[in-house]
Amino acid sequence: MARSKDPAVRTLLIERAAQMLRTREPITLRSLVAGTAVSTMAVYTHFGSMDGMWQALRQEGFTRLAARFAAVELSADPVRDLAALMAAYLRNALEHPDLYRVMFDANFELEDLKAADATLEYLVQAADRGRRAGRFKAGIVPLDLAIQTWAIGHGLVSLVAGGPLPRETLDHGAPMLAALYVGVGDDPADCRASIDRGWALLDSA
């Protein structure tokens, strides 16, 4: 008879794997369940295999990012919202550095690629609102601007989350975003004011 799946056990194993990554412990079937009061069979029950566990761990990173994006309160200012979403992205990476690294490990497929892709859609929608509001040139492609925004955040936080540079490195993000958005049509003064409002979420409680 097939064993029933307990969501609490699945979460426990994912958290355990993330913790082991953080402490640089080798992750094997036996080491993963050690001290958890669950058997090795639980890995097969919930993930099918160790590769399946890695897929789930990678997916969890995008799940948490989506939840963080969804928690951002949008405003009437799309440029502020783009900066706020990037601030949320950076905070998520800093709070979950191990899951953040696994998110982009292409050695393992995602469990739900569409759900992962949906995180980018938050940025696409904000970019499109900026175009429709006249903040960006009418000819800009919202997807392209969203990807460029993500690339700035990803590049910076990759150097900080478990990387060689201090947290203050993230302060470069606001002027980099301003240069990007002014380059596609936004007014320099309005742009920086909007970005500063959104960027403030990076250090909010």
Image (spheres, rainbow, N blue to C red):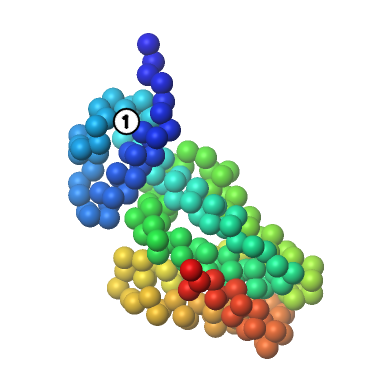
Q: 140 and 54: which one is in front?
A: 54
Three-letter amino acid code at the position of disc 1:
Val
Q: Where 202 falls versus 98 (above or below)? A: below
Camera sees residue 99:
yes
**In the rendering, at what x and y percent does residue 50 appear?**
31, 35
**In which quadrant will I find the N terminus?**
top left
Q: Which residue is mark 1?
A: 43
Q: In the rendered image, which quarter is residue 132 located in?
A: bottom right
Q: Residue at x 58, y 65 (%)?
A: 85
**In the rendering, at what x and y percent does residue 103 appear?**
42, 52
**In the rendering, at what x and y percent does residue 31 appear?**
20, 39
**In the rendering, at what x and y percent does residue 196 appear?**
59, 80
Q: Residue at x 34, y 77 (%)?
A: 166
Q: In the rendered image, which quarter is residue 75 located in?
A: bottom right
Residue found at the far bottom of this picture: 189
Q: Where 155 falls versus 32 (above or below)? A: below
| Left/right of residue 138 with respect to residue 193 in the rendered view | right
Dot 1 surroundings within 10 Å: few (below 14), some, or many (20 or more)? many
Q: Secondary structure at mark 1?
A: helix
| Left/right of residue 68 with respect to residue 77 in the rendered view | left
Camera sees residue 52:
no
